[in-house]
């Protein structure tokens, strides 16, 4: 199975290729600001780094910085978008050859590992991403989320092509549910509801539950039958089972 290549770059000279000189200059300044913010946030912490220091390191005026990112939280979002894009690229390049659950787990575990580089900074990142207040960073934040969801949907579609996932499943909808499993695991990590090993196990089990379902062995085939709604199917099968048990009991 092959996964369509997904690549996202919010900043950097690669994103500026093919643009006019003015727009290219804007992209290059944004790349310098993002790189400077990344370095100082990791070296001094979010609270320790100042916008003046970031602007100076990037070689721009402080007023120029605020045109691109009105707050430090916005700079942190830009750092996240750039870094998680790199993580996504690496994860998709190194996917296991087979197994939809294994491939999804590989992707999500790489993303989870990213957050362990600096837990305090990651907590700040996730908090900032929940409420993106400014237009300058809302676009990149939404774009990287859509890119991640598209990558997950591609893996689901690959699973359908290989016969591991039903053909009537909407890959985009399934991607949303699977991403929710990952976000739940990340929230557990950030809130201290288990160490990294426990959270990794929780994430892997959650992925398998999404792929394999909660139904007992044999019931998955019943639920997959076209026609009646799931509760009706289960009720019908239970009625048949009860009748068979009564018949067997009378025959003894």
Image (tube, helix red, strand yellow):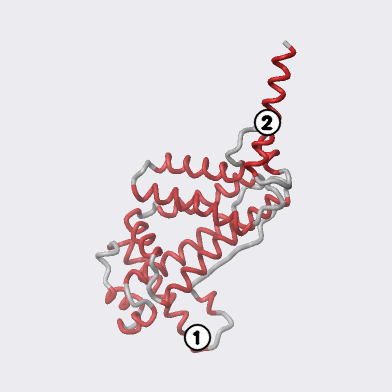
Q: On the image, which quarter does residue 39 sit in? A: bottom left
Q: Image height check: is 214 above or below 80?
A: above
Quickly name the residue at label 2.
239
Residue in the image at 44% along x and 48% along y: 185
- Relative image position of residue 177 (x, y in whole percent): 54, 53
Position of 162 with respect to 127 (left or right) is right
Position of 8 with respect to 61 (left or right) is right
Residue in the image at 37% along x and 62% along y: 125
Secondary structure at numbered mark 1: helix
Position of 105 with respect to 97 (left or right) is left
Label 2 CA crowd tier, 10 Å (few <14, some 14–19, many 20+): few
> Which image quarter holds the C terminus?
top right
Secondary structure at numbered mark 2: helix
- Relative image position of residue 9 (x, y in whole percent): 52, 70
Disc number for residue 23: 1
Distance (Cα) linking label 1 and label 2: 68 Å
Q: Image height check: is 171 above or below 99?
A: below
């Amino acid at each position: 199975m092959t996964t369509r290549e997904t690549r996202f770059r919010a900043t950097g000279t690669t994103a500026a290729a093919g643009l006019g000189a003015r727009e290219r200059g804007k992209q290059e300044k944004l790349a310098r600001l993002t790189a400077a913010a990344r370095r100082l946030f990791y070296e001094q912490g979010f609270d320790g780094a100042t916008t003046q220091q970031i602007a100076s390191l990037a070689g721009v005026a402080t007023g120029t910085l605020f045109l691109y990112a009105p707050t430090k939280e916005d700079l942190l979002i830009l750092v996240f978008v750039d870094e998680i894009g790199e993580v996504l690229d690496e994860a998709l390049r190194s996917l296991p050859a087979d197994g939809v659950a294994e491939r999804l787990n590989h992707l999500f575990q790489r993303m989870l590992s990213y957050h362990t580089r600096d837990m305090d900074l990651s907590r700040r990142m996730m908090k900032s991403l929940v409420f993106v207040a400014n237009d300058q960073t809302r676009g990149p934040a939404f774009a990287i989320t859509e890119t991640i969801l598209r990558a997950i949907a591609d893996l689901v579609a690959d699973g359908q092509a290989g016969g591991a996932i039903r053909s009537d499943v909407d890959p985009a909808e399934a991607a949303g549910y699977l991403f929710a499993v990952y976000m739940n695991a990340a929230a557990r990590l950030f809130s201290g509801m288990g160490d990294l090993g426990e959270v990794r196990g929780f994430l892997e089990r959650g992925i398998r539950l999404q792929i394999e379902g909660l139904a007992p062995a044999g019931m998955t085939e019943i639920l997959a039958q076209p026609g009646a709604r799931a509760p009706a199917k289960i009720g019908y099968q239970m009625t048949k089972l009860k009748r068979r048990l009564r018949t067997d009991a009378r025959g003894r």
